[in-house]
Amino acid sequence: MKKCVNLAESELRLVAAEVVEESADRVVRTLEAMRECPHVVAFLPSRDAPECFLGLYALPEDKLWWLEMLVDDPSLIKAESVKVWVLAPGVPEEVWLDVKPAEGKPPCGSECANCPLYREKCRGCPSSGYFLGA
């Protein structure tokens, strides 16, 4: 279910991430795995550099670490490099997010229960049965 979110009225920040993968095939697999993530606003694959894509995410302030840790260790998602920018507020004012009912595993297939950051730093995916609430 798509939901329109007014960024100014929410606690979400718009974040851009440039991801460089080992190959174009790896980009396709990553985009497929993440396509139903409730934080994804858009994926923009590169025409000129097929091993790269730009992801736009709407994340709560307390979850920005999720992308920032990938800058320090891109191998966590099997990427070669990750760059992240928290965008200035204001444009766009609204984004559409794919919000699914909370049940089972996250849409990306992550195993929240086995993650050392779950509960301590991460509240889990809002589209999964592991979500601990805001």
Image (cartoon, rainbow, N blue to C red):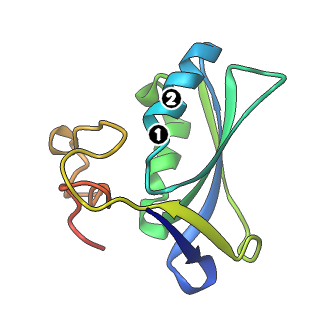
The residue most toward the front is 1
The residue most toward the right is 48
The residue drawn where x is 19% and y is 55% is 130
> Crowding at label 1, few (<14), some or many (≥20) Cα neighbours within 10 Å?
some
90 horizontally vs 112: left or right:
right
Inspect this view and state whether residue 74 appears: no
The residue most toward the left is 113
Question: Dot 1 corresponds to which residue?
Answer: 34
Q: Give the distance between the C-alpha atoms of the residues marked 1 and 2, in whole angstroms.
A: 6 Å
Quadrant of the rendered structure where residue 92 is?
bottom right
- How far from the left and from the top, in percent, is residue 32? 49, 31
Question: Dot 2 corresponds to which residue?
Answer: 30
Q: Which mark is residue 52?
A: none
* Placement of 40 over or under 14, stated as above or below: above
Contact, mark 1 vs mark 2 (Cβ under 8 Å):
yes
The residue drawn where x is 62% and y is 83% is 8
* Placement of 131 over or under 21, stated as above or below: below
Quadrant of the image containing the C terminus:
bottom left
- How far from the left and from the top, in percent, is residue 104? 18, 48
Amino acid carrying mark 2 in the image: Thr
The residue drawn where x is 77% and y is 72% is 91
Helix, strand, or loop for circle 2?
helix
- How far from the left and from the top, in percent, is residue 119? 19, 57
